[in-house]
Amino acid sequence: MSSEGRIHAVGHTEQNAALASRVAAQFAESAKLKLDASQVLVGPLTRAGILMAEALRQGGKVLACGNGGSAADAQHFAAELVNRFEMERPPLAAVALTTDTSTLTSIANDYAYAQIFSKQVRALGRRGDVLLAISTSGNSANVIEAMSTARELGLRIVALTGNGGGKMAALLRAEDVHICVPHKTTARIQEVHLLALHCMCDGIDFQLFGAKPR
C-alpha cells in the first residue's frame, strides 16, 4: 500500500471511531433523558391517559396535530388508537389533523397556514373531545391557533412540548395537561414524545379494556 493509501486508511479508521463514539453518546444521552424525564412526566402522563380514556368512554374523540416530526407523531398516535396498540380491542376514535392534503393546502392557500388545524378543530371538534397538541418548542403558531379554538369549543387539551413549553404553556388551564420534556434539543424531545405517546396508548387500553399491568 502506498503511503498516501496508508494515511487515507488511518484517517478513515479514526473517522469511523469518532462516528461510533458519537452514536454511542446519542444512545447514552437519550437513555439518561428518558430516565430523568420519568421523574417529572409520570404524573402528567397518568392524567393525560385518564382524560383521554374518559373522553373516549363518553363517545368523544382525540384530535391530534403538529408539524414536521410532530405531524408524524400525531399520525402515529391516531393510528395506534384507530387500529390497535398492543392488544386486540375495538377501534378508538382519533383523527390526525395532519393527513388531508386537500384540506391543509386549501386552508393555507385561501386563508393562512396558521389556520390549517384550527379550522379542522372547528369543523370536527365537539365539547368533550380532547385536542392532543404537539410541538417540541411549544411555539408552533398553527398548533396555538388550534388550542385557542379548542378552548372556545370546550375541548380539553393535552399539550406535548419541550424546552419549557413555550407560548403553549401559558394557554393551558388547570383542567388541561402539560407534558413538557425537560430538554432543549429537538431530537431528544421527539424521542421522549414517542415514549410518552406509547404510555398514553397503554394507559387508555388499560383503563378501557383491562390490559395486563406492566
Image (cartoon, rainbow, N blue to C red):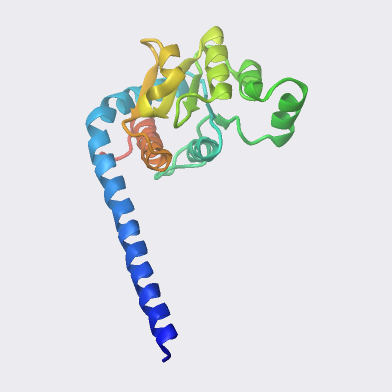
Above or below 143: residue 194 = below
Question: In terms of depth relative to the viewer, which is nearer, 136 or 19?
Answer: 19
Residue 214 visible, this orientation: no
Which residue is found at the position 51% from the left and 18% from the top? 129
Question: In terms of depth relative to the viewer, which is nearer, 74 or 16?
Answer: 16
Question: In terms of depth relative to the viewer, which is nearer, 1 or 120?
Answer: 1
**Residue 20 picture location, percent across and down:** 33, 64
Labels in figure, total = 0
Quadrant assignment, res 121: top right
Which residue is found at the position 31% from the left and 24% from the top? 44
**Residue 69 picture location, percent across and down:** 51, 40
Above or below 180: residue 172 = above
Q: 156 left or right of 44?
A: right
**Residue 131 picture location, percent across and down:** 50, 22
Q: 113 left or right of 73?
A: right
Q: 66 left or right of 111?
A: left
**Residue 90 picture location, percent across and down:** 49, 36
Above or below 90: residue 25 = below
Q: Quick one: quadrant of the C terminus?
A: top left
Residue 45 visible, this orientation: yes
Which residue is most to the bottom? Answer: 1
Which residue is found at the position 68% from the left and 34% from the top? 100
Q: Quick one: quadrant of the N terminus?
A: bottom left
Which residue is found at the position 71% from the left and 26% from the top? 108
